[in-house]
Amino acid sequence: MINLIGMEMPNYPTFEWILFGIIMGIISIFVFIFYIVYKRRIIEINSSLMVIFKRKLKEDKIKITIFTLISIIPGVIIFLIFTLMSTLMGGFDIIQVRIFISYIINFFLLYLGIAYTIAFTSTGIINAKRNGTLSWFLSKPIRRWEFLWGRILSYLFTSIMISVACSLSILIGGLLTFDPLYIEEILSIAGFIFLINILALLTLTAIGVFLSSVFRKTGLAIFIPIFMFMILPTIVGFLPIVVRSEWPLLFSFSYYFEELSSAWISQFGGGLSSIYLAYSELLGIDIFTLNLSAIHIVLILIILSISLFIISTLYLQKTDIP
C-alpha cells in the first residue's frame, strides 16, 4: 500500500479488544467488590476518602458534563469532514482517514489538556487552601492523603469519562461515515485513542496535582500549564535543529502523546513536536533520533505520573496548612 507522498504505508498495530475487555472486566469486578464492601460497611476502608471523592464529583458535575460533551467534538468533526469529502471527491482511503484523525487528536488533546488542567487539577488544592476547605476537612478525623487522593480519584474518573466520550465519538462517527472495509481499522483507532487520552490525562492530572500542592498562588498554577503545553513545545520544537538531536523534545509534553499517535494511528499526523522536521529537511541537517517505542513512552508517562503523585502526597503531608 502506498501513501499520499509515495512512501510505503506502515503496518500499524491492531488494538487487542479481547485483552482490553478482560482487563476492564477484572478491574470492574474489583471495583464492584470494593463498592459492596464499602456500602455494607463490612469493614471500614478509607471511608473519608470515598466521602471526599463523592463530594468532589458532586461539586464538579457541571464541569464534568461540559468536558464530556466537548470530548465528542473530534467524532463530530470527522463525521462532517469525511461526509463532505465523500460528496465532493467521491471517496477517500484509510491513509487519509488515519492522517486526519491523528491531526485532530493531537491538537484536540493539546488544547483540551490546557483547559482540563486549569479547570480541574492545577488550582484544586490551591483553592481548597485559600477558601478554607482544606483546613475544615483536616479539622475532622480526615488524613491529608485521604483529602488529596479523594480529589485525585475524582480527576481520574473525569479523565475516564472524557476518554470514553472521545473514543466513542470517533468510533460512531467512523462507522457512520467510512466504508465497511475500514471497520476493523476504525475499531483499532478508537481503542488506541482511548489509551492515548487516558495516558495523556493521567499525566496531566499528576502534573496539575503537583502544581496545586506545591504552589500557593493561582496565577502560577494557571500560567505554568499554558507555558508547558503551548509555549514550551513551540520553543522545544526548534531546538533539535540547534543541537542536532531530538533529546530536547523530552521536555515537551505534547511530544509523548504525538509519538503515541504516530505509532498507533498515523506517523504523518504531525504536531508541535515535529515542527523541526520540515526545517531540518529544508536545511539538509541530520538529526539524531531518539527511537522511543510506544512501550517506552507509556512507561515514561506512568513512572512520571506515579512519581508526581507520591511527591504531591508527601509534600501535602509535611506542609503547613493555614
Image: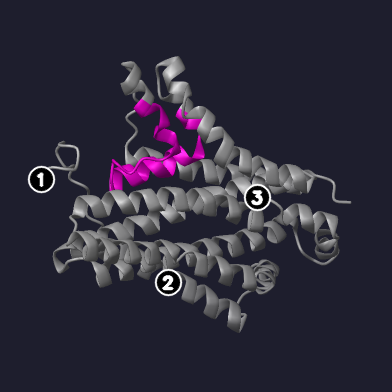
The residue that appears at 21% across and 47% down in the rendered structure is: 12
Q: In this rendering, which labeled residue sits more in front, label 1 or label 2? A: 1
Of residues 277 and 253, the one nearer the viewer is 277
Kind of residue indicated by mark 1: Met
Kind of residue indicated by mark 2: Ser
Return the residue found at the far front: 88
Of residues 77 and 37, the one nearer the viewer is 77
Q: CA distance from mark 3 to mark 1?
A: 45 Å
x then y, percent, for residue 255: 44, 37
Name the colouring of the figure: one colour
Numbered mark located on residue 1 in the image: 1
Q: Does the segment drawn in magenta span residue 194?
A: no
Q: CA distance from mark 2 to mark 3?
A: 26 Å
Packing grade of label 3 (10 A; few <14, some 14-19, many >=20) is many
Q: Which residues are magenta?
A: 249-278
Q: Quadrant of the N terminus?
A: top left
- Indicate which disc, 2 or 3, sits on the residue closer to the N terminus: 2
- Mark 1: which secondary structure? loop
Q: Is residue 50 above or below residue 218?
A: below
Packing grade of label 1 (10 A; few <14, some 14-19, many >=20) is few
x then y, percent, for residue 247: 44, 24
Residue 87 vs residue 110: left or right? left
Return the residue found at the far bottom: 40
- Mark 3: which secondary structure? helix
Numbered mark located on residue 209 in the image: 3
Numbered mark located on residue 28 in the image: 2
Residue 87 vs residue 275: left or right? left
